[in-house]
Amino acid sequence: MSNQPSNQDASINIVRAKLEHLDVLAPLFDGYRQFYEQTADVEGARIFLESRITAQESTIFLALGVNGEGLGFTQLYPVFTSVGMRRAWLLNDLFVAPEARKQGVAEALMEEARTFAKQTNAAYLTLETAQTNASAQALYEKLGWKRDTEHYFYSLSL
């Protein structure tokens, strides 16, 4: 796994998050949740992330600045394609701290996710975003992602 893709700003370092990154990662994850109108809960975020990392249930890439400050993260969950009989990845979370936006952080995280998916021989990466999130949609399309126009996605709240 590269720590710095060739097209990435040298002031951004992408690492695979480990337990020792929780102090930097948890506030970013809490900011992400607040963006989606959830109540602030840094301790709950820390516990959730610690569980995901410890159980190896997700892969989290963390963008760090030159002084080790957290700039953003993306979290991938494994899924599988039965038809293709291969692993795939759900890019479930992508967040960049407000002060780090428009600096290439999201693009660097997305490219690291793509590299990781290829390295794990995944069939595809998938994600969803709000219909109103035009800036995210523009980034995804710039990076070659295609909007699905053939399928409906359903969910069941429990």
Image (tube, rainbow, N blue to C red):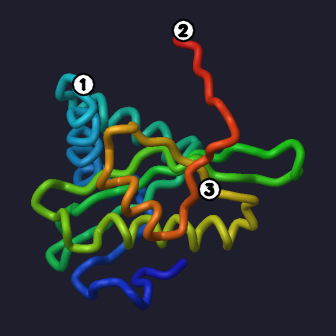
Element at badge 1?
A: loop
The kind of residue tagged 3 is Leu
Q: Earlier in the sequence, mark 2 or mark 3?
A: 3
| Residue occupying the point 45% across, 60% down | 140
Q: Position of residue 13 (x, y in %)?
A: 32, 77
Q: Position of residue 44 (x, y in %)?
A: 29, 28
Question: Looking at the image, do the residues carrying marks 2 and 3 touch, with CB atoms under 8 Å apart?
Answer: no
| Residue occupying the point 40% across, 66% down | 109
Give the vertical position of 109 relative to 51 (above or below): below
**Gap between marks 1 and 3 measured at Cα:** 26 Å
Q: Earlier in the sequence, mark 1 or mark 3?
A: 1
Residue 3 sits in which quadrant?
A: bottom left
Element at badge 3?
A: strand
Image quadrant containing the N terminus: bottom right
Numbered mark located on residue 158 in the image: 2
**Gap between marks 2 and 1 measured at Cα:** 18 Å
Query: On the image, numbered disc 3 is attached to which residue?
Result: 125
| Relative depth, front residue between 150 and 40 | 150
The kind of residue tagged 2 is Leu
Numbered mark located on residue 52 in the image: none
